[in-house]
Amino acid sequence: MTFSDYLSDIKLNRLDEAAIKSIESIKSIESIKSIESIKSLINSRINGCMFDSLKSDNSYIIDSSSKNPLLEITSQTVDFENCWIYVNNNSNGFNGFIRAIDSTIKNLNVIIDNYIIPEAGGIIMSGSNNFTVENCNVFICGNIGLNAGGIVGKYTTHYAGINDSNSYCNIINCMTICLNTLGTGAGCIVGSDAGLCQITDCVGVCLEETGTESGGIIGSYAGARTNGLCQITNCKFIGQIGLNGGGIVGSYAGSDGGSCQITNCISEGDINSLAGGIVGSYAGSYGGSCIISKCSSNGDINQLAGGIIGSYAGSDGGSCIISKCSSNGDINELAGGIVGSYAGSDGGVCNIFDCKSNGKIFANAGGIAGS
């Protein structure tokens, strides 16, 4: 099916003059123009300028005050045919507009002239399960709230710990650009507690601060708890990495008996205290596991942090395995070029193979592991 098949039922309005003016002001924001890497991403992932098609016949406006799903999609593949959805601004924030069950959503572009409320997603609403999101892009003017996600919110495919092995969430070739802050535990693509999730070829960008325990692609507790499994491949994040957070996945990834596997991912941005260039603190801890290979970070590594994994990697009876990874940036006091402080502590294990760091090493720091 295509999006046009739904239009007679949902009666969306075309873009009006006020919406077009708002979009024009978004396009002119100096912080976007000044970041060449973001311009390059936009041009390479969306043909030409990100906003070129907004005045065409495939552009629509949504009133963000509605808390009910605009679309309920079950057992369908819906091709949005690269249409644009503009979400207008109001004081209540936004919580997504599609509830998807056993379905695939593809080829959709969304501009949210607002913020995403805590635990919500920019496209997929809570209550969704067994879904794939492919070739979708979200541009957010406000912040991504506590534990929320730019595309999918918290509790992806059930709460981690009571995961159904038949559930899934696949995110493929998607991008989120956030002009504001990334909230505590949040992620640019998926929010916190992603139980069973595969994310491939995605990009997250955050121009302002990223919150404690947040992740550039997925928020905190990705693949955590019994039966949890989160797999991330070929993803990239551009932005500062917050306290205890991670450039790709936030804190506690694969912890509490779960598993998180990350391959061929990159982060670009300085790494805050206790954080990690790829995964945040407590990765694979408390009897869980975190496996990272062929990943790299580019940014200075602050106190107790790690270029790949933050502090307490594989601690408390957990396990971390890191191979063929690298970091590029100064390594500050008590930090490590690959893992932060207290790796494998309290009965845990942290194994590192064929890894390297490039940067000045300050007092009590380590080129591979912190204190």
Image: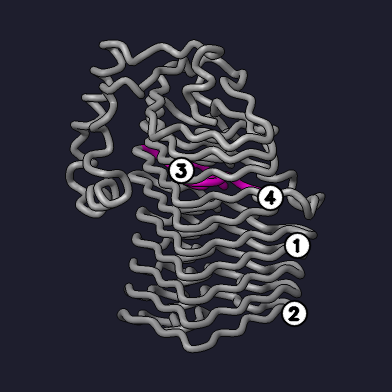
Frontmost residue, 319 versus 37: 37
346 in relation to 172, above or below: below
Residue 280 horizontal side relative to residue 182, left or right: right
Give the residue at mark 3.
Answer: 182
Which residue is nearer to you in this view: 347 or 4? 4
Residue 113 position by quadrant: top left
Amino acid under disc 2: Gly
Question: Which residue position holds label 4?
Answer: 168
Residue at 60% over, 79% down: 321
Q: Which residue is drawn at 26% across and 11% down?
A: 17
Magenta residues (range)? 180-193
Q: Name the residue under label 1.
A: 256
Q: Mark 2 points at which residue?
A: 347
Which amino acid is tagged 1? Answer: Asp
Is residue 122 placed above or below 175 in the rendered structure? Answer: above
Q: How far apart are marks 3 and 2 (CA)?
A: 33 Å
Who's the residue at 63% across and 41% down the image? 154
